[in-house]
Image (cartoon, rainbow, N blue to C red):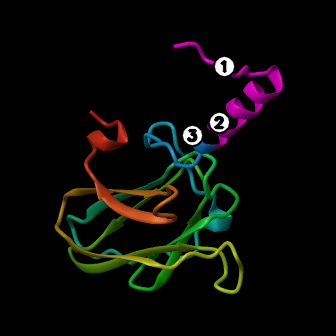
Amino acid sequence: MICKWKLSPKHLLAAVGVASVLSGCQTVVTPPSRATVVPENRTYARLAVSSPNPANVIVVRDSGFLGSGVDKRFYVNDELIAQLAPGEKLEFRLDPGEYIFSTHSGPASTILANAPVYLDQHIEAGKFYYYRLYSDMNKPGQLGRVTPKALGIE
């Protein structure tokens, strides 16, 4: 079977452009070793730790095009802890206990805002917990607990 239509350079360029945009519609995992630490001017709260053996929490925001123009706000028990830009990480310690982690972006009054995402967490002493802030076309502004391997940690 012979194709009867021709693809001009103009159409080929347009097709490549569309494919490039669509492939950029999800974020890419950023390993903590490559992520930069959230700067002090976007770190708002320091959580008090009294346990002799606190848990370690690492939150990493993916890099990539989708949602990159807006910082993601990260909360613990409704207290704003930090705003993360793409490719940044936040490391902190927590006493063992029950917590609600949440995230959303942008002021609620803007088109850039997305609905908050909540995670109920049971944190145990001395353990490491890893979280990923990510987006794709179906789920903008997501927060999920992940394994170290999922973040590129061996």
Q: Quadrant of the C terminus?
A: top left
Circle 3: element type: helix
**Tag 2 secondary structure:** helix
Q: CA distance from mark 2 to mark 1?
A: 26 Å
Q: Quadrant of residue 3?
A: top right
Residue type, mark 2 in image: Ser
Q: Residue 42 location in percent, x, y?
A: 64, 66
The picture quadrant where one finds residue 11 is top right
C-beta proximity under 8 Å, tags 3 and 2: yes
Q: Magenta part of the protein: which range?
A: 1-21
Q: Which mark is residue 23?
A: 3
Q: What amino acid is labelled 1 in the image?
A: Lys
Q: Is residue 24 magenta?
A: no
Which disc number belongs to residue 151? none
Q: Position of residue 121 (x, y in %)?
A: 25, 74
Q: Which numbered dot is residue 4?
A: 1
Foreground pick, 76 / 108: 108
Q: Tell me whether circle 1 and circle 3 mark residues in contact (CB < 8 Å).
A: no
**Residue drawn where x is 72% and y is 35% of the image:** 17
Q: Name the one closer to the observer, 14 or 128.
A: 14
For the point 56% across and 75% down, which residue is it? 114
- At label 3, the amino acid type is Ser
